Image (spheres, rainbow, N blue to C red):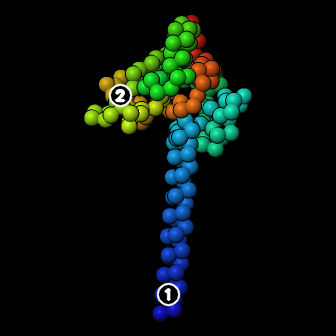
Amino acid sequence: SSRLSNMMHRLVLLLIIFVQVCSVRSNLLESCLSRGFDPTNLSCDTCALLSATDYHSVCLECCQSYKTLNSKTSRYKQAILVHSHGSEEIDKFIDEELEGIQQTKEGFSVEKAEIPRGAMSFFSMTPNVLYFFKGDAPKTEDNTAYTDLAQETIILHGWSKDDLKDMINTLLPDKK
């Protein structure tokens, strides 16, 4: 009886620890996503590209060390910016930098974000998201599918147009 009671106490203690670990992981994920980083796809190699910015330490908190970028030049073949008009800086990037980027870099495009059916735009703000692909980007009618298909996904919440331009210039190949 005391042995069973002791086992039950251990089981309850393990369950409490498990719930706390899950809660911490969930809080970290939410914190990273709210700051524009997706820990499920973020390589720590990418954080090195942000070393001169305020985002470097946040990026390091959110990245996955096991995800690496093998090639040191033009790490990706294509990138797609899914744009939702929710950020003044991203709007400025599109207005001021997009044409120049598309003239000098291979494989960069912008698509308008899909707004969920029946959703009021005020309550369902779709974030601006940058998807990177090592090969050709898949053809899809629904750009929300890129989340599962991209090799790296970056939510651009709080990003400046200059930081975005630098990242694209670093990660995509030059036109020949």
Q: Is residue 77 left or right of residue 140?
A: right
Label ID, residue 110: none
Label 1 and label 2: CA atoms lie apart by 55 Å
Q: Is residue 122 left or right of residue 158?
A: left
Query: Image height check: is 80 above or below 123?
Result: above
Q: Amino acid at mark 1?
A: Ser
Residue at the extreme front: 122
Are circles 1 and 2 on residues that touch, CB within 8 Å? Answer: no
Number of other residues with Cα within 10 Å of mark 2, as a class: few under 14, some 14 to 19, many 20 or more: some
Label ID, residue 114: 2
Which circle's residue, 1 or 2, is located before the other in the chain? 1
Q: Residue at x 60, y 24 (%)?
A: 160
Element type where label 2 sits in the image: loop
Query: Image height check: is 39 above or below 69?
Result: below
Element type where label 1 sits in the image: helix
Q: Residue at x 50, y 19 (%)?
A: 91
Q: Residue at x 31, y 25 (%)?
A: 141
Location of mark 1 (residue): 5
Q: Residue at x 51, y 52 (%)?
A: 26
Query: In what quadrant of the picture does the C terminus appear?
Result: top right
- Give residue 101's position: percent from left, percent from top: 55, 12
- Give residue 171's position: percent from left, percent from top: 59, 22
Q: Is residue 105 visible?
A: no
Residue at the extreme bottom: 1
- Give residue 75's position: percent from left, percent from top: 58, 24
Number of other residues with Cα within 10 Å of mark 1, as a class: few under 14, some 14 to 19, many 20 or more: few
- Give residue 157's position: percent from left, percent from top: 53, 32
Q: Amino acid at mark 2?
A: Glu
